Image (spheres, coloured by chain):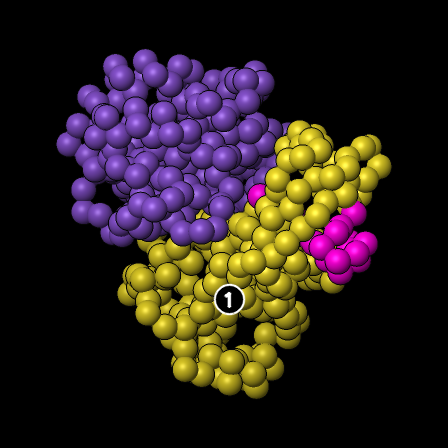
Chain colours: A purple, B yellow
Amino acid sequence: MNLLLLEPADFIGQGRVRLAGRRLTHMREVHRAAVGDSVRVGCLDGLMGDGVIHALDTEHAELSVAFDRPPPSKLPLTLILALPRPKMLRRVFQTIATLGVPRLILVNSYRVEKSFWQTPFLHPDSIRENLVLGLEQARDTVLPEVIVEKRFKPFVEDRLATMAQGTQGLIAHPGDFPPCPRALPGSVTLAIGPEGGWIPYEVELLQEEGLQPVQMGERILRVETAVTALVSRLF
Amino acid sequence: MNLLLLEPADFIGQGRVRLAGRRLTHMREVHRAAVGDSVRVGCLDGLMGDGVIHALDTEHAELSVAFDRPPPSKLPLTLILALPRPKMLRRVFQTIATLGVPRLILVNSYRVEKSFWQTPFLHPDSIRENLVLGLEQARDTVLPEVIVEKRFKPFVEDRLATMAQGTQGLIAHPGDFPPCPRALPGSVTLAIGPEGGWIPYEVELLQEEGLQPVQMGERILRVETAVTALVSRLF
């Protein structure tokens, strides 16, 4: 937690917040914060700034806060991801928020196990909780948008073209394809498959909407590692 | 597990192996393997090839195996890493093996909590277990070298210069430094600090040995994410 992320319900007055729960525990036990300490703060979906701790006990912390600077900019990226297995999904939400990915679309794929769609980590409260953890890590305040598209074909055929318009569309796919480009100047729409990869039919469908396959070498990366590696290379 | 990694003790004859334990469970429960199936195999620190399952029950699997191709090449990188917290350390071992980092040096730093050095994940058997998991993910056979240097100053002053000779030496460090370079042609020695970063004294010491600070932007990445992002950008 490199930023104390504040929500409207935390405010008890103008420039004054009261905290309990996870953030209080983290301040006390990890940061070993004390009265008088300064901490970096941010308003969810708003500005960042600084806070000073005025009161701190086992139940609550009270801080005065002021906001004066914008959060870091997001990447010009829409990330389309075949739904990962639940344990990985949770970390992926944190990672994309940390990296500054502004929009994540979770889609089905032939190689996604049906049971993955039942995970509680897809509940909106859980998605939000993990995105917030990622923002606190990076020092960002703006929640990424997460869209769940459970049916692959209608999403790709009916909505992908509009979404990808004016962007460079890429499919991360092992094989005899050009290497993933580096340091692109513009916006990107990037589709990353499940463990085991997209099936040829899915790649064809994505290609029909203008996305081009690119590869990252022989090594097979876990989804979370692949997301970070691709984002780091593209921007 | 994208590769069945075999060790000398697995062999019951020429080109014949018998497996039990974790790898058997994974073959049965995740891959749902059956007699007659082909699987990719590799010899630890040796060649890769293919295997065919001849027998499979709840206790054992028997395969005939043949090896005909080299593992993927490693990156020309020595990674120096301030010891991460235990849970992260375990994942870092897997990640560096997956990414193809051939040599990892774990060092102390002012901001490394002393208790981290007590973790069982630093036991050689545990290090090896996690490196193997990373190799199985990537389809590689060659174990990275892991060196534990508990004292920062003697390591940097006495051994780093020799180790970094002929390589481009970099310190990942937030601040007003040049951005991390991309797609370097030669060998690199890269030092990544702990949560909270290196202290100025440590950066100075690393600089005296010829390493140059570079930054990755405003966002603060978890160690595992930083390792992947830096490696992906450098090579």
Residue located 59% across and 53% down the image: B49
Residue A116 occupies which quadrant of the picture? top right
Q: Which residue does the image show at 49% across and 46% down from the upper left?
A: A220
Instruction: Tell which of B174 and A5 is nearer to you.
Output: B174
Would you say B136 lies left or right of A165 here?
Answer: right
Magenta-drawn segment: B2-18
Under tag 1, what secondary structure?
A: strand
Task: Pick whichever, B216 or B134, lies toward us.
Answer: B134
Residue at figure coordinates x 50%, y 70% from the top left: B78
> Does residue B60 appear left or right of residue B111 in this picture?
right
Decide whether residue B15 is among the magenta residues: yes
Mark 1 surroundings: few (<14), some (14-19) or many (≥20) residues within 10 A:
many
Q: What residue does disc 1 label?
A: B79
Residue B155: % across, % down:
59, 79
Instruction: Indicate the quadrant containing the C terminus of chain B: top left, top right, bottom left or bottom right.
Output: bottom left
Q: Position of residue B220 (x, y in %)?
A: 42, 49
Q: What residue occupies the far right of the structure in this picture?
A: B59
| Foreground of the two, A130 or A52 | A130
Is residue B189 visible in the rendered image? The answer is yes
Q: Is residue B22 visible?
A: no
Residue B156: % across, % down = 54, 79
Q: Is residue A12 magenta?
A: no
